[in-house]
Image: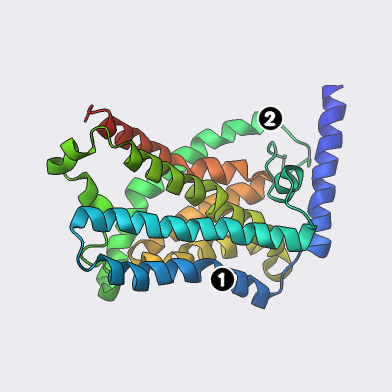
C-alpha cells in the first residue's frame, strides 16, 4: 500500500511538472523582467537609501540600519512572489503555495516517485554548501575583487563591526538584535529569495534554457546580489548548488535547508551574545 501511494504521489508530482511546463513557462524577457523587479529594490536600498541615511550614524547603528533596509528588500521579494502566484494561480492559499513552490518530499529523478530516503542527500549537500561558504567562495571573492577593485566592499558596509569584541557587552540581553536577524533570515533563505528564485523562476525557465535551467537560475541568483557585488562569485556557486538540488530532487525544501545553514550558524552565535555566553 505504501508503494502504491508513493507511485500515485510521484505520478501526481510529474503531472504537476508537466502542467507547469505547459502553461507556466516564461520568455527570456519575462525572466529578466522578474529578475530585475526582484533585485532593483535591494540595489536601491543598498546603494542609494543606505548611504543617504547612514552618513551621520556610528558604525553600530549603521550596521543595524543596513540589516533593516535589506530585510525590507527581502520582504518585497515575498510580496512580489505572492503577486505573481495570485496572477498565475488565482489564489494564494497554503495548498497552492505548497504545490506551486514544491514544498513536498523529494522525488526520485529516475522513477518520478516520492521517496523519503532521498532526504539523506541533504547531509552531503549541506556539507558542500558549508565548503562553498567558508572555503571556495571567499577565495574566489578575493580573486574577483583583486581583478575588479571597484567591487571591493566599501568602508561602513560590513556588518562585522556589529560583533567586534569590544561590543560584546552591548548585546547582552539585546533580544531585538536576535529578532531582527531571525526576521531577516526567514525572508532571506525561505520566504524571499527561495520563493522567488526556486519557487517562481526555476519552474518557468525550462522553456528558454532547457536542461540547463538550473545553471541559468544559479547565475541569475548570484548576479542579483549587486547590493553586495564583492560576494557575487560565492553567491553564483551557492546559487548553482541550491538550484541543482531543487531541480534534481523536485523539492524546494532542499534549497531552503541548504540556504539556511549560514543563518542557523549566525543565529546560534548571536543567541550566545544575547545570553552573555560569548
The vertical placement of 271 against 202, above or below, is above
Q: Secondary structure at mark 2?
A: helix
* Residue 202 visible: no
Assess whether mark 1 and mark 2 are in contact (beta carbons under 8 angstroms): no
Earlier sequence position, callout 2 versus callout 1: 1
Display colour scheme: rainbow
Residue 52 percent location from the top left of the image? 29, 72
Q: Quadrant of residue 151?
A: bottom left
- Which residue carries the number 1 mark? 37
Q: For marks 2 and 1, give the CA distance.
A: 36 Å
Left or right of 256: which side holds 86?
right
The residue drawn where x is 64% and y is 63% is 212
In this orientation, which residue lies closer to the viewer: 135 or 222?
222
* Residue 267 visible: yes
Q: Secondary structure at mark 1?
A: helix
**Quadrant into which the N terminus falls:** top right
In this orientation, which residue lies closer to the viewer: 220 or 42?
42
Q: Quadrant of residue 24?
A: bottom right
**Quadrant into which the C terminus falls:** top left
In this orientation, which residue lies closer to the viewer: 76 or 21?
76
Q: Residues within 10 Å of mark 1 (few under 14, many from 20)?
A: few
Q: Which residue of the protein is positioned furthest toward the top in this rendering?
A: 1
Front tag of 2 and 1: 1
- Which residue carries the number 2 mark? 116
Residue 192 percent location from the top left of the image? 54, 54
Residue 143 percent location from the top left of the image? 29, 65
The residue drawn where x is 36% and y is 70% is 49
Left or right of 1: which side holds 215?
left
Q: Residues within 10 Å of mark 2 (few under 14, many from 20)?
A: few
The residue drawn where x is 22% and y is 68% is 55
Left or right of 273: which side holds 116?
right
Residue 5 percent location from the top left of the image? 85, 29
Amino acid at each position: 500500500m505504501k508503494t502504491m501511494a508513493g507511485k500515485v504521489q510521484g505520478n501526481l508530482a510529474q503531472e504537476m511538472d508537466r502542467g507547469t511546463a505547459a502553461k507556466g513557462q516564461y520568455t527570456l524577457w519575462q525572466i529578466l523582467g522578474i529578475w530585475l523587479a526582484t533585485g532593483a529594490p535591494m540595489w536601491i536600498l543598498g546603494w542609494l537609501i543606505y548611504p543617504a541615511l547612514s552618513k551621520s550614524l556610528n558604525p553600530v547603528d549603521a550596521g543595524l540600519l543596513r540589516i533593516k533596509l535589506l530585510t525590507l528588500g527581502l520582504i518585497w521579494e515575498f510580496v512580489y512572489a505572492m503577486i505573481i502566484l495570485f496572477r498565475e494561480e488565482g489564489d494564494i492559499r497554503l495548498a497552492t503555495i505548497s504545490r506551486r513552490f514544491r514544498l513536498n518530499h523529494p522525488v526520485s529523478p529516475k522513477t518520478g516517485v516520492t521517496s523519503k530516503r532521498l532526504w539523506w542527500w541533504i547531509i552531503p549537500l549541506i556539507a558542500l554548501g558549508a565548503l562553498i561558504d567558508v572555503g571556495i567562495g571567499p577565495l574566489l571573492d578575493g580573486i574577483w575583487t583583486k581583478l575588479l577593485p571597484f567591487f571591493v566592499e566599501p568602508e561602513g558596509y560590513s556588518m562585522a563591526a556589529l560583533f567586534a569584541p569590544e561590543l560584546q557587552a552591548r548585546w547582552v540581553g539585546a533580544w531585538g538584535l536576535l529578532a531582527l536577524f531571525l526576521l531577516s533570515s526567514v525572508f532571506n533563505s525561505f520566504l524571499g529569495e527561495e520563493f522567488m528564485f526556486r519557487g517562481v523562476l526555476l519552474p518557468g525557465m525550462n522553456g528558454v534554457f532547457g536542461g540547463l535551467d538550473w545553471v541559468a537560475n544559479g547565475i541569475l541568483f548570484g548576479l542579483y546580489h549587486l547590493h553586495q557585488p564583492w560576494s557575487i562569485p560565492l553567491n553564483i556557486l551557492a546559487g548553482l548548488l541550491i538550484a541543482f538540488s531543487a531541480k534534481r530532487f523536485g523539492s524546494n525544501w532542499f534549497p531552503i535547508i541548504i540556504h539556511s545553514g549560514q543563518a542557523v550558524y549566525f543565529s546560534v552565535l548571536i543567541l550566545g551574545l544575547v545570553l552573555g555566553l560569548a
